[in-house]
């Protein structure tokens, strides 16, 4: 069309020149608009357990845990968004901190969001109020499964549909949605707007506190027939309801509230010493350290703690320990 208009003889040279400049200006503006749209539509990067290179969990006996999650990432230079997935669902968002382990000055966090609007049937219906969905049902007369298009009018107490010019509720058909809304996610996610100046791969560490993870010590003493000897076994019991799995984690246990659990802890400490003196079996898996008023037990090997799992790890084991009543 432009070529045809430029070739018309009734346009003089000056008009053709002006017209050409206008066309070029519009084309340049179009290219800028396309570039801007491409930049704004840039895919948000995401990272999950596949990028994890290490994780450590310090568990306090007050239903609290400190998680340090290390991951290897390839981030583009400049400003961009990153979805940090597979975090605890009971995370305390105000405790989150992220840093670069390669160069602390190469990574800056501009914004931080904790997305927890999780996908479920109720919220999915709420998001589609006023929009079209499909109802898949079995026709009782023809015994065939049919599909009908409907508009979801409301989801208060149950979905209400408009099919054609009629309103109905309690429809027996299965609801088919065209897609998942962008603001609904399948699991809790941290979203950062960050600025990266490193051209090579980044290694980052995200640390945060979470509720829902606890530990305690359990002891079993089995006396012999004369009640003068006993077998002692001690177990660390970890209960994880934090909402995520810690795979091959470095585990530390902290007895932090000494005043509240002093009697129980002192009893366990005496049993630990007695068993250590006469133990002739397995080497203890935990190393004990004292730090101010805290006692820290470090597991000497990595272990996996699954979500919604109660895990027991041997703390001490001794046979034929002397007992006095």
Image (tube, rainbow, N blue to C red):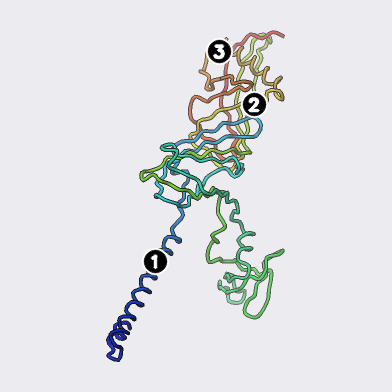
- Which dot, 2 or 3, sits closer to the camera? 2
Percent across and percent down for residue 313 are 56, 27
Which of labels 3 and 1 is toward the front? 1
Vertical comparison of 37 with 246: above or below:
below
Q: What residue do we see at 64% from left, 75% from top?
A: 162
Residue identifier under label 3: 279
Q: Quadrant of the N terminus?
A: bottom left
Left or right of residue 273, residue 3 in this image = left
Q: Is label 2 in a helix, a strand or a loop?
A: loop
Q: Earlier in the sequence, mark 2 or mark 1?
A: 1
Mark 1 highlights which residue? 32
Label 1: which secondary element:
helix
Residue 197 appears left or right of 173: left
Give the residue pinned by disc 2: 256
Marks 2/3: CA–CA distance: 27 Å
Q: Nearer the viewer, residue 213 or 279?
A: 213
Q: Is residue 14 left or right of residue 77?
A: left
Check the image and name the residue furthest to the front. Answer: 14
Mark 3 and mark 1 lie on one chain; the one further toward the N terminus is 1
Q: Position of residue 273 (x, y in %)?
A: 60, 13
Dot 3, how many residues are within 10 Å of its Cα: few (below 14), some (14-19), or many (20+)?
many
In space, the residues marked 3 and 1 are separated at their CA atoms by 76 Å
**Rendered location of residue 323, percent (x, y):** 66, 9
Mark positioned earlier in the residue sequence (2 or 3)? 2
Q: Tell me if residue 180 comes above or below residue 30 in the rendering.
A: above
Q: Residue at x 51, y 18 (%)?
A: 283
């Amino acid at each position: 069309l432009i070529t045809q208009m430029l070739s018309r003889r009734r346009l003089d040279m000056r008009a053709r020149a002006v017209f050409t400049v206008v066309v070029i200006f519009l084309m340049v503006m179009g290219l800028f608009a396309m570039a801007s749209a491409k930049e704004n539509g840039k895919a948000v990067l995401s990272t999950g357990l596949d990028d994890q290179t290490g994780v450590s969990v310090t568990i306090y006996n007050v239903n609290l845990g400190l998680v340090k999650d290390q991951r290897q990432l390839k981030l583009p230079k400049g400003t961009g968004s990153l979805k940090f997935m597979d975090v605890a669902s009971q995370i305390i968002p105000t405790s989150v901190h992220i840093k670069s382990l390669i160069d602390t000055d190469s990574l800056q966090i501009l914004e931080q969001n904790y997305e927890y609007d999780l996908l479920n049937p109720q919220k999915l219906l709420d998001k589609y109020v006023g929009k079209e969905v499909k109802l898949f049902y079995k026709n009782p007369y023809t015994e065939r499964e049919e599909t009908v298009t409907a508009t979801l009018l409301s989801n208060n107490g149950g979905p209400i549909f408009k099919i054609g010019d009629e309103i109905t509720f309690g429809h027996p058909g299965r609801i088919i949605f065209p897609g998942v809304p962008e603001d609904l996610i399948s699991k809790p996610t941290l979203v950062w707007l960050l600025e990266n100046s490193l051209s090579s791969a980044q290694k980052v560490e995200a640390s945060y506190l979470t509720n829902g993870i606890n530990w305690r010590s359990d002891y079993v003493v089995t006396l012999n027939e004369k009640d003068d000897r006993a077998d002692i076994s001690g177990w660390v019991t970890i209960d994880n309801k934090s909402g995520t799995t810690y795979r091959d984690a470095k585990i530390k246990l902290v007895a932090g509230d000494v005043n509240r659990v002093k009697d129980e802890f002192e009893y366990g400490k005496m049993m630990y010493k007695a068993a250590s003196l006469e133990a002739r079996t397995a080497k203890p898996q935990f190393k004990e350290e004292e730090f101010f008023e805290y006692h820290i037990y470090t597991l000497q090997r990595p272990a996996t703690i699954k979500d919604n799992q109660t895990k027991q790890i041997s703390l001490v084991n001794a046979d034929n320990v002397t007992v006095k009543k």
